[in-house]
Amino acid sequence: MKKYLSIMMLAARGSLYKALGAMLLMGLAQVGVYYAALRSALTDREAELQEQLLHPEYGTWDIPYPTLETILEEGLLSGWITIATIWIVGFVLVAYLLATAGNPLKGGNSSTRLTIQRMPMKEWKISLCYAVYNFAVMIIFWAFSILVALLICKLYYDQADPNSYGSQSVFLMFYRNDLFHGLLPLAETLKYIRNIVLFAATGVMASSFDFWNRRGKRNFWTIIVFLVIAAAIPKGLGTGGSDAMWTVAFARLAVEEIYRMAGQLEDGDQA
C-alpha cells in the first residue's frame, strides 16, 4: 500500500498545481464572460427602453429583464465564447496537463520519468496508479465546475430584478442549461454514471498518453478523445440514449487501453 501512495504522490508532484491553476483560470474566465454578457444584455435592454420613451406613439410594450438562461446562451462574439465553450477548453487543458506530467519534452518533470522507470513494479501497474490519480483530479474538476455554476447563479440572483426570477429559478436553471444539467443532472441517475465513466476514461487515457510517450510513440489522437469527452458532457434533458452509448463506448475504450498497456509489457518492452 505504501508504494502505491508513493506513486500517487509522485503523480501529484508532476501535475497537481498546474491542474488546479488551470481550473482557477477556467472559473475566472467563466465569471468574466458572464459579467460581460450580462453587461451587453443590460445595455441592449436600456437601448430598448430609451427607444420606447423616444417614440411614445408606438405605444408601450414589455421589455423584460434579461434572464440568466439567455445570458449564458448568448455569451460573447455572437455565442462563440460561452461558459460552456470555456468549460470544454478547461477540461481538455486539465486532461492534457495530467497526460504530460511525466514527459519532460511536454513540460513534465524529468525526474518523475526516471523514477517511474526505476520502480520495482511493472509499469502498467504504475500507469494504473496514475490513472486512479488522474480520475481523482478530474472528480475535483467536476466538483469545482459545479461550484462555479452555483456561483454564477448566485451572482445573477443577487443583482437581478426580483421580478425576473422565482424561488425555484436555480433549480430550474440546472434543467434548462445543457452545461449545468450535464454537470449536475439532478434526478437523472444515468448521467451521474455517464460522468463517472467519462472522467475515469479520461484518467486512463491521460495515463496511457504518458505511457506511450515514454516509448517514443506520440498518441495525439488522445487529445481528440479528451475533446470528444468534454463535448459529450454538456447535454440537457432527453438524452438518455446517447448517455448510455457514451457510457458503454468509453468504458470499453478505457478497458481496451489498459489491456494494450499491459500487453505491451508482456511483449518484453520494459523501457
Image (cartoon, grey):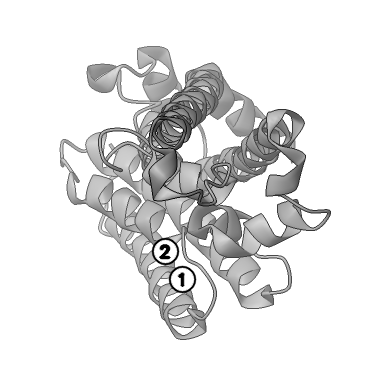
Task: Say if mark 2 contacts mark 1, CB within 8 Å.
Answer: yes
Q: Position of residue 175 (x, y in %)?
A: 62, 64
In this view, the residue farthest toward the bottom is: 241
Q: Secondary structure at mark 1?
A: helix
Please name the residue that numbered disc 2 is placed on. 254
Count of numbered circles on the image: 2
In the picture, the quarter occupied by the N terminus is top right
The one nearer the camera, 35 or 128, is 35
Say few, some or many: other residues with alpha carbon within 10 Å of mark 2 (under 14 / 14 to 19 / 20 or more): many
Residue farthest to the front, as pictured: 57
Above or below residue 95? Residue 38 is: above
Residue positioned 25% across, 58% down in the render: 267
The image position of residue 192, as x and y in percent, is 64, 66
- Where is residue 96? Give x, y as percent: 35, 34
Please determine whether, in this image, residue 85 is positioned above or below residue 42. below
Which label number is shown at residue 251? 1
In space, the residues marked 2 and 1 are separated at their CA atoms by 5 Å
Q: Determine the image quadrant of residue 186.
A: bottom right
Residue at image location 32% in from the left, 36% down from the top: 81
User: Does residue 57 appear left or right of residue 64 in this picture?
Assistant: left
Q: Mark 2 falls on what kind of element?
A: helix
| Tag shown at residue 100 | none
